[in-house]
Amino acid sequence: MTTRPCARDPLGSAGSRKLNSKVAPVAMMSPCVTIAWLVASAAAAQVTPPTGAQEAQVEAGAPAGDPSPAAPAAAQAPAAEPVSDAQAPQEPPSQPPAQPGADAPGAAPTIDPRAFEALQLQVLELSDEIEMLREDAEFQEDRLKQTLPKANLLSGYVDLGFFWVQGDGSGIRNDQGYRHYPEYADSGIPDTWVFRGDPLSTAVNSRGEPADTGESRALVFDSLDSGGGPSFAINAVGVNVFAALSEDATVTAMVDLLPRLRNVSDPEGVGLGDMLDVKLAYAEYIVPTDAVKLSLFAGKFDSVLGVEYRSQDAPDRLGVTPSLICRYTCGRPIGVKARLTLFDALVANVSVSNGSHMMEMFPFYNEIDLNGMPTAAGRLSLWVSRSAGLDVGVSGSIGPQDFQTETDVMHMHGGFDLRLDWNDLIVAAEFVIGEAKGATESGSDVRCDGAACLEYLGAYGKIGYRVSTWLTPYVRGDFRDALHQSGGSFVYLSELWRATVGAQVELGERAALKAEYILNKELTEGPEFPNDVFTSSLVLKY
C-alpha cells in the first residue's frame, strides 16, 4: 500500500493566511494537518516587532492597529477653546515600549516568513518519517501474516480410554442350525456364517473400533480383541501438521498412532501390532475473491456427506463413540473437492474421488480406484440462522462400487441432516439410505458372489445441554437396518436400535473427560444377547 505524502505547503502561501482560533480539535485531524496546525501555532508566536508609527500611536493613546486616516480627521476639527491649567486634561501615563517579539495591543499577528520556512522544512522531514513508519508497519504486518500460521505447525491429542462390554465383546451371533433364518439353508452359506446383529455396535472409542469382532467374516481385523473383558487402552495418539504455503494456500495432514496388541509368539503375526493411520493429507487453496467464498482441495480430505464427520475425532466429538451410521458418511476419500459459500448462508460442497465416503474399517472403501471411474458426491446446506447455529442439508453420492472392476456396478447413497447449536443446547440428527448393488457371477446360484451386496437404512439423533462451562450431559438414539451379503462367505442381517447416555467434563482448555453407557437391542429374529457397552475417554490436547 502506498501512502500520499503531506502537501508541500499545508497552510497555503507563506504569510498569506491568518490563523483561525476556532480550529478543529487536533484529535480529529489527519497526521499531516495536525503537524501543519502545530507548526502554524508555534509560528504565530514569532511575529515581527511593532514599527515606529505603531509605537507613536500607542504613546498617543490610539490603538496600535488603527488605520492612518485618523490623523487627517483630527486636522479638520475646529480649534479648541483655551482652558485653564486646572481644566487641562492629564497626560496618560506613559506605557513601556513593546518588547521585541511581543504583540502590540490590538495588532493582528503576522508570521515571520523565515521562521515559517524553517518550520515547513521540519514538517517535510516529519512527513518523510511518518511515511517510513507506515511502510515499516506494513512490512511487519505482512511478516506477521506469514509467521502466525507457522506458530502452530504441530498439534494433536492423546486419547486414553477404559471400557467394558458384556458377553464376548462382539455385537453379532451366528444362526447355528438355521433356527431363525431357515430361508438361508439352501443359499450355499453355512449356518455359522449367517450372522444377526452388527459387528460395529460395540464400538468403544471415537475411531469406532469394536471391543471384539467375534466370529465376524466381514470384519476380520480385530484391532482390540478384548474378548469382552474390561481394559485400559491408548485409543489414539493424534498428530496434526499444518503449514501455510502462502496467504491463500495451506497444507494439512493428520495421522493416528495406534498402540495395539500383538502376540510375538504367534507365527502368523507380523511386527509388534502398532499401526499408523493417515487420516488426512490435503492441500487447500482459498480463491482470493470478495464476490464469493470458494475453497479448493486436493488429496485425502474430509467427507462431504452429512454432518457427523465434522466432529468425528476425539477432541471434537461430544461423547466417546460414533453413531451406527457414521460408517457410511465419516470416511475420508482421495480426490478433489470444492466448497462454495453464497450470501454467507448457502453452502455447496462437492467432490470427485476414487471411491466412497465410507469409513476404512467398513469393507466398501478403497483408497485406490480399481474400476477407472470416480465417485461424485455433494452436500447442499442452508444456514437457516447463524445466530442460532441452525444448519440443514441434503447430501448424496453415486459411483462404481469399490473393490470390483466394473463401472456399471453402482453404489448410491442419499441423506439429509440437521444441526443446532443455540445458547447451551446442542442438537444433531441425520438420516441415510443407500445401496451397493453388488454382482452375481453368470450362471451362479449364490447371490452376490461377484461383488458384495449391501442395502442400508439408518438414522440417529443426539441432544446435549451445557449445564455449566465444564459439564455437558447428552443422550443419543440410533437405528440401523441393513442386509450385507458376499456370496457364500457370509450374510449379515442387522436390525437394531441403541440408546446412549453420557456426560462430558471439561478439565480446562486442553483436557476433557467423557463417559457413556450404550444399550444395544437387536430387533432381528432370535433371542437377545448381552452386548451393552460402558466406555470412557480422557482426551489431552497439545
Image (spheres, rainbow, N blue to C red):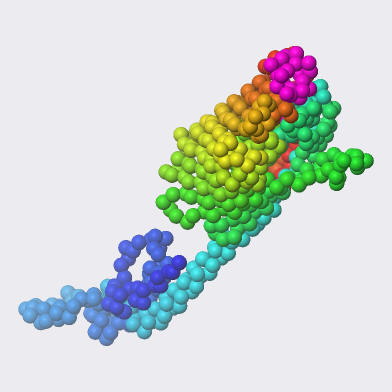
Identify which residue is drawn at 32% across, 63% down.
22
Q: Position of residue 257 (x, y in %)?
A: 76, 46
Identify which residue is drawn at 65% across, 51% down.
281
Can the viewer see residue 90 in this picture? Answer: no
User: In the displayed structure, would residue 109 be above or below residue 416?
Assistant: below
Count of numbered badges drawn on the protein: 0
Instruction: Classify residue 524 by image quadrant.
Output: top right
Q: Is residue 335 left or right of residue 67?
A: right
Q: Residue furthest front?
A: 443
Identify which residue is drawn at 41% across, 51% down.
291
Residues 315 and 380: in front is 380
Residues 406 and 540: in front is 406
Can the viewer see residue 416 in this picture? Answer: yes
Range of residues picked out in magenta? 172-201
Q: Residue furthest right?
A: 265
User: In the displayed structure, would residue 322 be above or below residue 247?
Assistant: above
Q: Is residue 296 left or right of residue 196?
A: left
Identify which residue is drawn at 76% across, 41% down.
236
Q: Position of residue 372 (x, y in %)?
A: 59, 47
Q: Is residue 40 left or right of residue 356?
A: left
Q: Is residue 40 left or right of residue 143?
A: left
Residues 167 and 288: in front is 167
Query: Is 181 covered by the magenta stretch?
Result: yes
Instruction: Classify residue 181 by image quadrant.
Output: top right
Query: Is 240 covered by the magenta stretch?
Result: no
Instruction: Classify residue 307 by image quadrant.
Output: top right
Residues 358 and 386: in front is 358
